[in-house]
Image: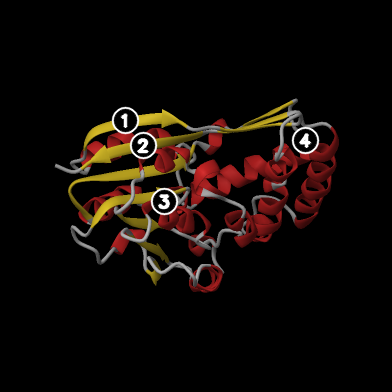
Amino acid sequence: MSAQSHRSDPRILGRRTLERDHRCLAELLRPGLSVLDVGCGTGSITAGIAKAVGPHGQVVGIDRDALLLELARKEHASATNLRFECGDATALPHMAQFDVVSSTRTLQWIADPALAIWNMKQALRPSGMLVVLDYNHADNSWEPDPPGAFRLFYDAFLAWRSRNQWDNRIADQLPALFRSAGLVEVSSRVQDEVAERANPGFAERAALWSDVIENVGEQLSAAGFCTKRQIEQARETYRLWASTTLARQTLALKAVIGVTR
């Protein structure tokens, strides 16, 4: 699989929930709404959306990755108001069909986010709402500072993403992209993921980067951003540091909302 067709780790996707990992959308959903979830992955957040809109609502999850969709269909087969389709955010077939279109941590992997936003807008009914949650990877931080082996990996990760034209500050770009697409009432909310050692769920949150190293390390080394040995050193060093020294991790996220005319 090439970097341009990156596959997100299903372990990471499967741990996410609507209430914890897309808080802004969870607050906006109401029974009876029709919702399109773009970049649904394994469907863990999508299933939460289906539960929130209830039996009179309808939810469609769309993703370009057939393997992730297969996992989603198996895991959430009992949800009668939910279906999954194969498709791409930059070529959506839907026109004026949904009350809400959502995209969660997806535009970070798209080289032309403006086209994706335009397509998502087209899928909305008049006065429909687009809700996008995504990262500013360049602003993520750890306390205390991470060890050098992990820092080297993370710098390589950002450089690899940049070469693939994936914006490391996509969250900051979203409001302007929304307005360019013709959306109105655009607003942005900080939705940082903060994990502190004293709080529940810390180990799971901190383990994210062990999974990322395993998931993309081979692609980074194949592309020349670091060596296989450096990837292995990052994996070993980060796992030990996260389990003993890391006190606080802040992943920079923003949710941006816009409305169709």
Q: Position of residue 114 (x, y in %)?
A: 30, 47
Q: Which of pointers 4 and 3 lies earlier in the amino acid sequence?
A: 3
Q: Which of pointers 2 and 3 lies earlier in the amino acid sequence?
A: 3
Q: Which of pointers 2 and 4 lies earlier in the amino acid sequence?
A: 4
Mark identifier at residue 256: 2
Residue designated by label 1: 187
| Left or right placement of residue 85 versus residue 105 in this view | left
Amino acid beneath label 4: Gly
Residue designated by label 4: 148
Number of numbered callouts drawn: 4
Label 2 crowd (10 A; few <14 / some 14-19 / many >=20): many
Question: For the point 41% across and 51% down, which residue is it?
Answer: 52
Q: Position of residue 179 (x, y in %)?
A: 23, 37
Tag 4 near tag 3, CB within 8 Å = no
Amino acid beneath label 2: Val
Q: Spatial distance from mark 2 to mark 1, Cα to Cα?
A: 6 Å
